[in-house]
Image (cartoon, coloured by chain):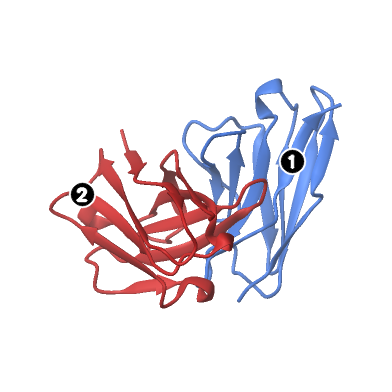
Chain colours: A red, B blue
Amino acid sequence: EVQLVESGGGLVQPGRSLKFSCAASGFTFSDYAMAWVRQAPKKGLEWVATIIYDGSSTYYRDSVKGRFTISRDNAKSTLYLQMDSLRSEDTATYYCARQSYVDWYFDFWGPGTMVTVSS
Amino acid sequence: DIQMTQSPPSLSASLGDKVTITCQASQNINKYIAWYQQKPGKAPGLLIHYTSTLVSGIPSRFSGSGSGRDYSFSISNVESEDIASYYCLQYDNSPWTFGGGTKLELK
């Protein structure tokens, strides 16, 4: 059974940094692209970043480029998101998602971790 | 970026009704659209991909259709467990973009 479990969210002040992780199990992690998708309170879904199976390429939405870094450790089956220079508009639940093997839609999601950026 | 215009934002239905949600893309997305269900406090779950391919284990009362820029998602015989929000996703091009969502409520 595919399982994705995020950890490390919390309350952080504007301008500060936060790094959280997603532990994957139930599939061969190193075969799949992985992503972070976020959802601000009472709002819709927004793709944040993607990393391909071996970590050699990454993609970001414009509003987080230069501030967020997606990375992975295939030996540990773990995905990471390093968030720097945080802004209030980054407040959201962040979901770790597996991207399907062929077409890269999001086929499995973790339960999410909440990040609140506030002074 | 491809914009996904989803409608309606909310929908009220009675048990047993058929409901339809639409998503219009700002350009041709070549049938690369998926549909998700999200219940309050939970992560989204994949229902359909490539316009009409039902995920294993999803009831056949869920269906999708469309081509080019215009797509639809339907639930026939709405059941109480279907009360949720629904989102479309285009995955034809990066950045991946979602529709604004449709909240399905019971009448």
Q: Is residue A35 left or right of residue A26?
A: right
Percent position of residue B44, x then y: 54, 42
Q: Is residue A110 above or below residue A64?
A: above
Residue A68 as seen in the image, left or right of residue B15: left
Residue at image position (61%, 33%) is B39
**Disc 2/disc 1 C-alpha distance (Å):** 35 Å
Q: Quadrant of the N terminus of chain A?
A: top left
User: Most extreme residue toward the front, as rendered?
Assistant: A119
Q: Amino acid at mark 2?
A: Ser
Question: Mark 1 — residue?
Answer: B103
Identify which residue, B9 or B33, lies in the foreground: B9
Q: Check disc 2 and report the residue beneath it.
A: A77
Q: Residue at x 34, y 40 (%)?
A: A5
Q: Is residue B32 visible?
A: no
Residue drawn at (51%, 40%), measured in percent from left and top?
Answer: B43
Pointer 2: residues within 10 angstroms few (<14), some, or many (20+)?
some
Q: How many marks?
A: 2
Q: Nearer the viewer, residue A113 or B100?
A: A113
**SS at mark 1?**
strand
- At x 45%, y 43%, the residue is A112
| Subunit ID for the residue under disc 2 | A
Percent from the top left, x then y, of residue A116? 51, 50
